[in-house]
C-alpha cells in the first residue's frame, strides 16, 4: 500500500507563518481606485428616489444602468441581481458602488447619498416556497399503513457564519477590453462565467486569477461572483485599477451563510420495534435569492437517513425565500442540518421505545450493498462497525455513559455516526462541471499542474502536488502548482463539495501517469485529462433516483461535555473522531481538517449564535458572533481508517466536509445526557438549556 | 484628522488638559474600536486626543499607606503577573480579553469606558477601590462605584485624568469569580459575578457581592450585605430566598445580541446562591 499519507511540510506553511504571504487586500497597484458598496437600509420595498451629492472630481457612481449584459449573477436560477434596480429584497442589498482614488472622499460620498424607499411588508417566515423537491424509496405509504406506531418530531437549526479569517475582496484592472480580476475565491471559473454574462463579452476578455485565500469554508464559492460582476462593471466604466475589499462587519452582514432549517421527521415503527419507513420534510431558508439553495436542499434531502438504511422513504423539501441575507454554500452544504435531525431522531425514537440507544442505532446502520436513500447502492465496503467500536474504546464511551446517565451528573457523552457523499450530487460532475486538467512538463523536467483548484488553507496544493510526485516518482520540489489563472488553466471545476482530492486529484494522477509513460528528458510535454463518470453510476435528477455520489466518506464523532449548574454553559471536554476518507493523502493535512472541522461542527451545535432582527443580522462581528478560541477548543484525538476507493487517487475520497457534519449531533446528544432533557434545536445555547432544565414537559 | 498630542510627562498632560478638553487615550482598546473607520483611514475621532500610554511615571504598582496603589497607565498583563495584585482582581483580569489586548489596556480605561459589562469593575467595586482624578490645580479621590454613573457615563471632569487606582488592603477567606461570556477568551460578559467573604469562627464578618451586565451599572448593595454580617453561613443558606429576593429588585437586565434578560437574571441569582452555599 502507498505511503503517500506520510506528512510533508505544507508547501504554503512557511510563507503563511512568517507573514510573507500576500492576500488580496495587501496587493497594491499604483494609481488604483477604491470601491465602496451602497446598500439598502430596508428589508423589502422599492427605491423611490436616489439623491446623489455633487460628485467630487474622479468619483464615479456605478449602478445597474452601467451593466452591459444581464443584471443577474449567473448561478442556477436567474433571480440574483448584480445591483438592485427598483425592488429591494433584503437589508444590505447592493444598489451601487462609489469609486474614487481617495478612500476618505469615497466614504463621504457614500455617507451623503440619500435613498428614499417605499416600504413593503417583509417576509421572515418559511412560507414562500420557490423550490419543491420530492422523492420516494420503496413503498412508504404501505409501511406507514402497517405501522404499529408512528413517531414524529421537528428539528431546527440556525444560521452559521463561515468566519473565514480574510473577508471577501477583489482587485481588478482593465486593459483595452480585457477585464482582469484577482480575488479571494474558491471557484475561478464560476466568477469568470458570471462576469462574461454580466458584461456580455467574449470569454477571452475576462481573466480571473485566484489570490492567496485566507479561508473560505464555502463562503467564497458563489458570493464572489456577485462582487466580481460589480467590480467588472465598475472597471468598464472607470477604466482604472480598482480595489473592492469588504470590512468584517459588512462581510458578516451581507454575505451568504448556512441555511437555517426546519426538518420534520416521522417514522413508522413495525412490530419488531424496527423503523420500517421515514417521512421527512426538509425546509431551508434561502434568504432573499435562490442562489445555490436548490443544490443545498438536494444534498440535505439525500442525507435523509444519513448512515442508516431505512427500507421505505418519502422525502420532501422546500427552499423558502425570505427577506433576509441570501444563504449559500458552507462546508457540509445541507448535510449538517440533516444529520443533526437524523441523529437526534434516532435517539429520540430509541428513547420513546425504551431501547438501548447504541444497540438500536446499530440495528439500523447501513451495510455494503444496501440501497441508499435514492435507491442507489453502497458499493464499497462500509467499516462503520469497526470504526464505532474504535471510537467507543478511545473514549471509554460505554463506561462513561453509565456514569453520566445518573440524574444530576451534569456530564454527558454523545456520539454521532454519519456519511458524506463525495463530489457533486448526481450527474453534476458529468453534466455541469466536466472537469479538465492539464499537466505541463517543461524543459527542466519540472511538472506544472494546470488546474483551477484553489488552496484556501485546506492543503489542496500540497496534496495534489504529492499525488503528481508520487505517480511520477519525482521529488516534490520538481512539481509546481501556481494559483489558478483562467488564462492559463482549464476548468477543473470549483474547489467545493469535497471533490478536489478525489475528482481533480484522480485526474491529476491519470495525467501524471500519461507523462510518466511518455517521459522524454528535457522535452516540453503537455497532457490533458477530463472527467468521466464511473460507468456504474446512473442518476435521474427528475426523480432523485440512482447513485447520488460516486463514493461516501464515513465518520464517528464522540463528544464529552460538562454543563455548569449555575450558568447552564457547556464545556466541551474531549472530542474523539474516527474517519474513513478512503486513503489519506497526507496525515497531518487530514488531521488538520479533522480538528478544524470538528471545532466548526461542534460549535455549530452549541456555541455559534447568529440571528437577525427585522432582517438585520445582529451578530455581525467576531465579538458578538462567538466561535471557539484556542482556549475553548477541547482535546481532540482522531483515528483514520484506510478504505481505498478504486477511482480516487491512491484510494482517496472526500475529507473536507466530513469532519464538520457530525459535530452538532455529537455535542447535542452529550448535552441531552448531561441535563436529561431532549434537544430539538441547535445551537443548544445556555439560554435554551435553561428553558429545558426549568421545563417539566420535555 | 483631529489634533493629537503625545505629552512627555504628567505635568505636560495636565497642562494640555487644562487648555482644552482632550480625550485621554490609554491603551485605546475601547476607543479605537468605538471610533473604527474603513480600513486604512484614520479613526473617526471628533475631539482632540491626548496619548498617555507612554507616561511611564504612571506605570507602577506599590504599597502606600496600607493601600495598593496602581499607576493608571499600568497594563493589565503586568497586573496579572504582579504579586501585589489582589487575588480577586487577578482572577478577573485573567479572563479579560486576550494576552495581546491585556498588554495594552488599563484599569482606568475599563472604568471610564463605563460599560455595564466591564469586568475589572467587579473586583474594583468589591474591593472598595478608589480612583485619583487630577487636573492641573485639583486632586480628588472617588470610589470607583461612585465614579461610574451609567453606561458610558462617569463623573470624570473634562480637564481631569485618572492618575492612580487605590485599593484598600483586605483579606477574605472566600473569593469567587465567575464570568459567563460564551467562551473563555475575548468574550463580553453576559453576566459575571464576584463574591468575597471573610468567615471567622463560623461568623460572616465581611460579605461583598458584585454583578455586572444585569443593570445599567454594576450591582453592589452594601445595605443587603450588612444585614447578613455576624451570622453563621448556614443562617444565610437557610434564608436564601430572602437574600435572592433582595437582589432580585436590583437585577434588571436587557435583551441584546448576546443573551436575553430571563437568562441573565436567572444566572445572576444562581451565581449568588452558589456562592453563599460555598461559605
Ligand atoms: C478584543 C477585545 C476584548 C476585550 N475583552 C474585554 C473583557 O473581557 N472584559 C472587559 O471588561 N473589557 C474588555 N475589552 C474592553 C477593553 O479592553 C477594556 O475596557 C480596557 O480595560 C480598556 O482600557 P484601555 O486602556 O484600552 O482604554 P481606552 O480605550 O484607552 O480608554 C477607554 C476610555 O477611558 C478613558 N480613559 C482611559 N484612561 C484614562 C485616564 N487615565 N484618565 C481619564 N480617562 C481615561 C478614555 O478617554 C476612554 O473614554 C475588550 C476589548 C477588546 C478590543
Image (tube, grey):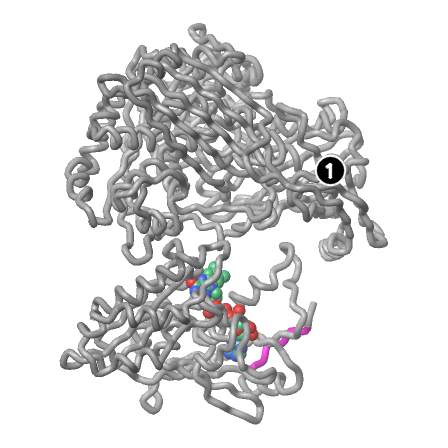
Instruction: Look at the image and say whether residue A306 sits in the magenta stretch.
Output: no
- The picture quadrant where one finds residue A71 is top right
- Whether residue B104 appears in this view of the structure is no
At which x and y percent is residue A75? 63, 26
Query: If the image is split into quadrants, where does the C terminus of chain A sit?
Result: top left
- Dominant SS of magenta comes to loop
**From which residue to which does the magenta span run?**
B3-8
- Whether residue B82 appears in this view of the structure is yes
Query: Looking at the image, which is closer to me, B218 or A688?
Result: A688
Please give the chain letter of the residue carrying mark 1. A
- Residue under the point 41% across and 25% down: A654
Left-right relation of A403 to A6: left
Which residue is labeled 1 in the image? Answer: A87
- Residue under the point 19% across and 44% down: A404
Q: Residues within 10 Å of mark 1 (few under 14, many from 20)?
A: some
Left-right relation of B162 to A599: right
Amino acid at each position: 500500500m502507498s505511503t503517500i499519507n506520510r506528512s510533508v511540510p505544507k508547501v504554503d506553511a512557511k510563507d503563511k507563518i512568517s507573514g510573507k504571504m500576500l492576500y488580496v487586500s495587501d496587493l497594491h497597484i499604483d494609481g488604483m481606485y477604491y470601491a465602496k458598496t451602497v446598500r439598502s437600509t430596508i428589508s423589502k420595498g422599492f427605491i423611490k428616489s436616489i439623491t446623489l451629492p455633487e460628485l467630487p472630481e474622479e468619483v464615479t457612481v456605478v449602478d445597474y444602468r452601467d451593466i452591459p449584459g444581464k443584471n443577474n449573477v449567473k448561478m442556477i436560477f436567474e433571480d440574483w441581481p448584480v445591483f438592485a434596480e427598483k425592488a429591494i429584497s433584503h437589508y444590505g442589498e447592493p444598489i451601487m458602488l462609489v469609486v474614487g482614488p481617495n478612500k476618505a472622499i469615497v466614504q463621504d460620498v457614500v455617507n451623503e447619498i440619500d435613498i428614499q424607499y417605499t416600504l413593503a411588508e417583509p417576509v421572515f417566515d418559511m412560507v414562500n416556497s420557490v423550490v419543491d423537491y420530492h422523492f420516494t424509496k420503496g413503498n412508504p405509504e404501505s409501511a406507514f399503513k402497517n405501522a404499529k406506531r408512528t413517531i414524529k418530531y421537528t428539528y431546527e437549526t440556525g444560521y452559521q457564519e463561515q468566519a473565514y479569517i480574510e473577508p471577501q475582496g477583489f482587485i481588478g484592472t482593465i486593459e483595452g477590453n480585457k477585464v482582469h480580476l484577482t480575488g479571494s475565491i474558491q471557484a475561478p471559473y464560476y466568477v469568470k462565467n458570471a462576469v462574461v454574462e454580466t458584461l456580455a463579452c467574449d470569454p477571452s476578455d475576462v481573466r480571473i486569477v485566484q489570490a492567496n485565500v485566507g479561508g473560505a469554508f464555502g463562503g467564497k464559492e458563489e458570493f464572489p461572483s456577485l462582487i466580481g460582476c460589480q467590480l467588472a462593471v465598475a472597471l468598464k466604466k472607470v477604466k482604472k485599477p480598482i480595489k473592492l475589499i469588504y470590512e468584517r462587519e459588512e462581510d458578516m452582514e451581507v454575505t451568504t451563510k448556512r441555511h437555517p432549517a426546519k426538518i420534520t421527521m416521522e417514522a413508522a415503527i413495525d412490530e419488531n420495534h424496527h423503523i420500517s419507513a421515514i417521512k421527512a420534510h426538509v425546509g431551508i431558508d434561502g434568504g432573499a435569492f435562490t442562489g445555490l439553495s436548490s443544490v443545498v436542499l438536494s444534498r440535505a434531502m439525500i442525507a435523509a437517513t444519513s448512515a442508516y438504511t431505512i427500507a421505505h422513504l418519502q422525502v420532501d423539501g422546500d427552499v423558502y425565500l425570505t427577506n433576509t441575507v441570501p444563504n449559500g454554500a458552507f462546508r457540509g452544504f445541507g448535510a449538517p442540518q440533516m444529520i443533526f435531525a437524523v441523529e437526534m431522531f434516532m435517539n429520540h425514537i430509541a428513547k420513546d421505545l425504551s431501547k438501548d440507544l447504541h444497540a438500536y442505532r446499530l440495528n439500523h446502520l447501513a451495510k455494503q450493498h444496501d440501497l441508499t436513500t435514492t435507491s442507489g447502492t453502497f458499493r464499497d465496503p462500509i467499516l462503520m462497525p469497526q470504526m464505532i467500536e474504535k471510537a467507543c474504546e478511545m473514549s471509554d464511551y460505554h463506561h462513561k455513559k453509565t456514569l453520566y446517565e445518573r440524574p444530576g451528573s451534569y456530564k454527558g457523552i454523545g456520539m454521532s455516526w454519519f456519511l458524506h457523499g463525495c463530489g457533486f450530487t448526481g450527474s453534476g460532475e458529468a453534466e455541469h462541471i466536466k472537469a479538465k486538467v492539464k499537466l505541463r512538463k517543461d524543459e527542466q523536467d519540472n511538472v506544472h499542474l494546470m488546474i483551477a483548484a484553489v488552496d484556501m488553507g485546506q492543503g489542496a496544493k500540497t496534496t495534489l502536488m504529492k499525488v503528481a510526485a508520487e505517480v511520477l516518482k519525482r521529488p516534490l520540489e520538481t512539481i509546481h502548482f501556481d494559483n489558478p489563472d483562467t488564462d492559463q488553466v482549464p476548468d477543473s471545476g470549483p474547489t467545493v463539495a469535497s471533490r478536489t482530492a478525489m475528482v481533480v486529484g484522480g485526474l491529476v494522477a491519470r495525467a501524471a501517469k500519461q507523462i510518466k509513460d511518455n517521459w522524454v528528458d528535457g522535452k516540453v510535454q503537455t497532457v490533458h485529462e477530463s472527467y468521466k463518470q464511473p460507468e456504474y453510476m446512473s442518476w435521474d435528477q427528475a426523480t432523485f433516483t440512482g447513485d447520488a455520489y460516486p463514493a461516501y466518506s464515513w465518520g464517528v464523532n464522540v463528544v464529552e461535555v460538562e454543563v455548569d449548574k449555575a450558568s447552564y454553559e457547556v464545556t466541551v471536554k474531549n472530542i474523539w473522531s474516527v474517519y474513513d476518507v478512503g486513503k489519506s493523502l497526507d496525515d497531518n493535512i487530514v488531521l488538520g481538517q479533522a480538528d478544524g472541522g470538528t471545532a466548526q461542527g461542534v460549535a455549530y451545535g452549541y456555541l455559534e449564535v447568529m440571528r437577525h432582527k427585522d432582517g438585520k443580522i445582529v451578530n455581525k462581528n467576531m465579538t458578538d458572533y462567538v466561535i471557539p478560541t484556542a482556549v475553548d477548543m477541547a482535546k481532540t484525538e482522531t483515528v483514520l481508517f484506510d478504505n481505498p476507493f478504486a477511482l480516487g487517487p491512491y484510494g482517496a475520497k472526500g475529507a473536507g466536509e466530513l469532519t464538520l457534519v457530525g459535530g452538532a449531533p455529537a455535542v447535542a446528544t452529550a448535552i441531552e445526557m448531561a441535563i436529561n432533557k431532549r434537544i430539538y434545536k441547535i445551537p443548544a445555547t445556555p439560554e435554551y438549556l435553561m428553558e429545558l432544565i426549568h421545563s417539566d414537559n420535555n | 484628522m483631529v489634533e493629537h498630542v503625545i505629552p512627555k510627562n504628567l505635568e505636560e498632560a495636565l497642562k494640555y488638559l487644562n487648555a482644552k478638553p482632550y480625550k485621554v487615550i490609554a491603551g485605546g482598546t475601547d476607543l479605537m474600536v468605538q471610533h473604527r473607520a474603513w480600513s486604512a483611514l484614520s479613526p473617526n475621532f471628533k475631539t482632540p486626543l491626548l496619548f498617555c500610554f507612554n507616561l511611564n511615571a504612571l506605570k507602577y504598582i506599590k504599597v502606600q499607606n496600607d493601600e495598593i496603589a496602581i499607576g493608571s497607565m499600568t497594563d493589565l498583563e503586568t497586573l496579572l503577573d504582579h504579586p501585589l495584585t489582589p487575588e480577586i482582581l487577578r482572577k478577573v483580569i485573567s479572563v479579560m480579553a486576550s494576552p495581546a489586548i491585556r498588554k495594552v489596556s488599563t484599569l482606568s480605561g475599563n472604568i471610564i469606558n463605563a460599560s455595564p459589562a466591564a469586568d475589572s469593575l467587579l473586583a474594583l467595586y468589591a474591593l472598595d477601590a478608589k480612583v485619583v482624578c487630577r487636573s492641573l490645580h485639583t486632586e480628588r479621590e472617588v470610589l470607583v462605584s461612585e465614579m461610574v454613573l451609567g453606561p458610558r457615563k462617569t463623573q470624570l471632569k473634562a480637564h481631569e485624568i485618572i492618575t492612580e487606582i487605590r485599593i484598600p488592603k483586605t483579606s477574605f477567606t472566600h473569593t469567587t469569580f465567575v464570568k459567563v461570556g460564551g467562551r473563555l477568551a475575548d468574550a463580553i460578559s453576559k453576566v459575571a459575578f464576584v463574591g468575597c467573604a471573610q468567615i471567622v469562627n463560623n461568623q460572616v464578618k465581611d460579605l461583598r457581592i458584585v454583578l455586572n451586565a444585569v443593570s445599567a451599572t454594576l450591582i453592589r448593595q452594601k445595605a443587603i450585605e450588612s444585614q447578613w454580617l455576624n451570622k453563621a453561613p448556614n443562617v444565610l443558606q437557610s434564608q436564601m430566598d430572602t437574600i435572592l429576593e433582595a437582589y432580585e429588585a436590583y437585577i434588571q437586565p436587557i435583551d441584546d445580541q448576546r443573551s436575553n434578560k430571563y437568562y441573565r437574571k436567572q444566572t445572576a441569582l444562581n451565581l449568588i446562591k452558589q456562592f453563599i452555599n460555598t461559605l
